[in-house]
Image (tube, grey):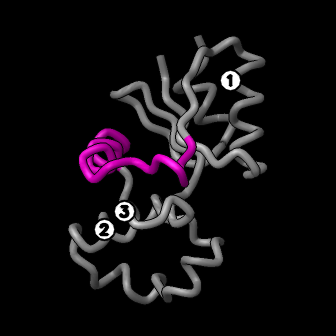
């Protein structure tokens, strides 16, 4: 079973879930604001994805801009970055889809075809 960390009003999340439904991929949804990933989950997601921390930030979000994170992230240590991400689910790019091994961040159909198609 895959887990989709999403924010229900998010258009990108809706597209991703619609794609999964259309391809009959079962998933459980987790509300990224009400139940954000834990520090341990984030660390595992980063490790399994092979992505840099900055790819986990919702750079178009209001909170990201308010906190001026664009300028802070390059000099921040990993613990600080994880603290930011776990402090507010709105700071996290979404959806994050994982089966515990593979991870996709955001929705790109080519990534979903490669990783989530049965």
Q: Which residue bears the numbered disc 3?
A: 53
First in sequence, mark 2 or 1: give its number.
1
Q: What element carries label 2?
A: helix
Assign a secondary structure to mark 3. Answer: helix
Spatial CA distance of label 3 from label 1 is 25 Å
Q: Is 2 included in the stretch rendered in magenta?
A: no
Residue that mark 2 sits on: 83
**What residue sits right under mark 1 in the picture?**
20
The Cα–Cα distance between marks 3 and 2, rounded to whole angstroms, is 12 Å
- Left or right of 38? Residue 92 is right
**Relative to 69, residue 7 above or below:** above
Label 2 vs label 1: CA separation?
Answer: 30 Å
In the figure, 113 relative to 56: above or below?
A: above
Look at the image and say whether residue 37 sits in the magenta stretch. yes
Q: Is 24 placed above or below 75 here? A: above
Nearest to viewer (mark 2 / mark 1): 2
Q: Where is residue 22 in the image (x, y as percent from the top left)?
A: 77, 18
Q: Where is residue 82 in the image (x, y as percent from the top left)?
A: 30, 64
Pointer 2 local density, CA inside 10 Å: few below 14, some 14–19, many at least 20: few
Q: Which residue is drawn at 69% across and 11% down?
A: 24
């Amino acid at each position: 079973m895959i887990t989709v960390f999403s924010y229900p009003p998010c258009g990108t999340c809706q597209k991703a879930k619609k794609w999964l439904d259309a391809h009959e991929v079962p998933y459980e949804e987790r509300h990224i604001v009400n139940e954000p990933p834990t520090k341990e989950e984030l660390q595992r997601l980063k490790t399994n994805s092979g992505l840099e921390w900055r790819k986990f930030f919702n750079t178009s979000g209001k909170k990201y801009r308010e906190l001026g994170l664009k300028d802070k992230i390059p000099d921040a240590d990993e613990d600080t970055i994880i603290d930011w991400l776990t402090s507010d689910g709105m700071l996290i790019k979404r959806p994050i889809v994982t089966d515990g091994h593979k991870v996709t961040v955001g929705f790109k159909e080519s990534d979903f075809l490669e990783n989530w198609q049965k």
